[in-house]
């Protein structure tokens, strides 16, 4: 193909600068320019396609990184209940595992409800003691997210501080034991994630230790301004002996009330059975039953009674697990008659097969 400025006459051809010769020459030049344009368009299309592929790949990578790193967002499910089939094998259990239930039940909202707060904290503690190895990766993230929300709530409200300190200490002790056994694959995930979570737990513990309880600015009637009978009545509503002991340090009057034998007797009878009490009898110097010391001895030997204002419930008719007061699809004529309240330990036992 001749180029511009090149002799347009080919060997063996006796072309002359006639009209037909110029016409053929110009046609060849036009075809050459068209070929160049086609080639450029093809290369441009290839470049655009390559850029689009890179853009799609980068976008997918950003979405994946956002999904992996954005652990502040809990996995949400449309329904607030889960079907549970109590079976002896994993096949009968299906997908319904402890991690699945932990993902689908609305624990993030539950901690904002004072009636459910203690229930969720107790459940977190039980999982920290023995169920960490059964949680999937997403369940681990949700567990840590809920725990973080619990800590932030306590830091803001300055309530239930001791309860959360005990939870964090239990979790940290369990992780120390499990991380040392990482070679046996007892934990799901990279060990660096768990080490980072342990550092986060230590940071939370330091924040809780640095809490300074602020005195309310409003001046009005306080507990010590009430009649002694009302003060004693309020102390009888407390279910933790440590709270009574701490309250007795406020004033001399409360200390006297905090040593009341009847108060500690009722507390012992509330948490423990008669058989347990008979096994741990302690007599005072006067030969009377020392109910206060008996209580703390019984606490070290037996679990205390648990009572919650709002719990998870299991429907015996349709085997659906949900929070108390949450509607669920049940075919029974009277669904409420089939609902059974579950303690935190009962909840975990549902997923043991």
Image: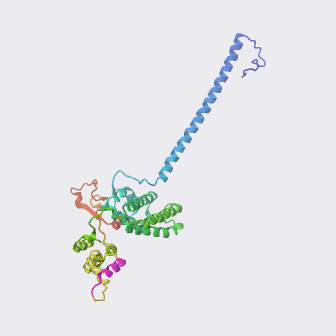
Is the residue 34 above or below the residue 231 in the image?
A: above
Judge whether residue 251 is colored magenta.
Answer: no
| The C terminus: image quadrant | bottom left
Determine whether 271 is above or below 94 in the image: below
Task: Assign the magenta stretch its main secondary structure.
Answer: helix
Residue ID at (31%, 80%)? 292
Image coordinates of residue 237 in percent, x first then y, are 26, 70
Residue 146 lies left or right of residue 289; in this view the side is right
Camera sees residue 207: yes
Quadrant of the image occupied by residue 51: top right
Tell me residue 301's x, y (percent): 36, 78
Given residues 97 and 143, the one toward you in this image is 143
Q: Position of residue 87 (x, y in %)?
A: 35, 63
Query: In front: 291, or 206?
Result: 206
- The image shows residue 29 at horizontal and vertical percentages of 68, 20
Left or right: 38 in relation to 146: right
Residue 83 in view in this figure: no
Quadrant assignment for the N terminus: top right
Magenta span of residues: 288-301
The residue at the point 47 percent across, 64 percent down is 203
Give the quadrant of residue 266. Answer: bottom left
Specify the farthest residue to the front. 219
- Please state the total of marks drawn on the protein image: 0
Please state which of residues 103 and 24 is positioned toward the viewer in this rendering: 103
Q: In this view, does 71 lie to the left or right of 343?
A: right
Coloring applied to the structure: rainbow
Above or below, 87 against 46 in this view is below
């Amino acid at each position: 193909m001749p180029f511009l400025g090149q002799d347009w006459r080919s060997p063996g051809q006796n072309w002359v600068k006639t009209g037909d010769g110029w016409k053929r020459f110009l046609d060849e030049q036009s075809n050459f320019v068209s070929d160049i344009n086609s080639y450029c368009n093809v290369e441009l299309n290839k470049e655009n396609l390559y850029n689009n592929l890179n853009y799609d790949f980068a976008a997918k990578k950003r979405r994946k990184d956002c999904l992996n790193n954005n652990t502040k967002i809990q996995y949400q499910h449309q329904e607030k209940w889960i079907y549970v089939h109590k079976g002896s094998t994993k096949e009968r259990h299906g997908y319904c595992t402890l991690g699945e239930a932990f993902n689908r039940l609305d624990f993030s909202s539950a901690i904002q409800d004072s009636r459910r707060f203690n229930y969720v904290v107790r459940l977190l503690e039980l999982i920290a003691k023995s169920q960490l190895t059964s949680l999937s990766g997403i369940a681990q993230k949700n567990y840590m997210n809920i725990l973080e929300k619990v800590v932030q709530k306590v830091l803001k409200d300055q309530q239930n501080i001791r309860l959360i300190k005990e939870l964090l200490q239990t979790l940290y002790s369990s992780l120390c034991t499990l991380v040392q056994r990482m070679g046996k694959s007892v934990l799901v995930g990279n060990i660096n994630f768990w080490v980072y979570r342990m550092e986060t737990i230590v940071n939370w513990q330091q924040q809780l230790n640095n809490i300074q309880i602020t005195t309310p600015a409003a001046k009005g009637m306080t507990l010590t301004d009430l009649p002694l009978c009302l003060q004693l009545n309020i102390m009888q509503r407390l279910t933790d002996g440590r709270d009574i002991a701490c309250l007795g340090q406020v004033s001399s009057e409360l200390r006297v009330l905090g040593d009341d034998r009847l108060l500690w007797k009722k507390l012992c009878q509330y948490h423990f059975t008669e058989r347990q009490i008979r096994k741990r009898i302690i007599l005072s110097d006067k030969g009377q039953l020392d109910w206060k010391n008996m209580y703390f001895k019984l606490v070290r030997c037996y679990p205390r009674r648990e009572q919650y204002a709002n719990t998870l419930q299991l429907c015996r008719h349709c085997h659906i697990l949900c929070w108390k007061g949450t509607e669920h699809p049940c075919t029974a004529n009277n669904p409420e008659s089939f609902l059974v309240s579950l303690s935190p330990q009962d909840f975990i036992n549902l997923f043991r097969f």
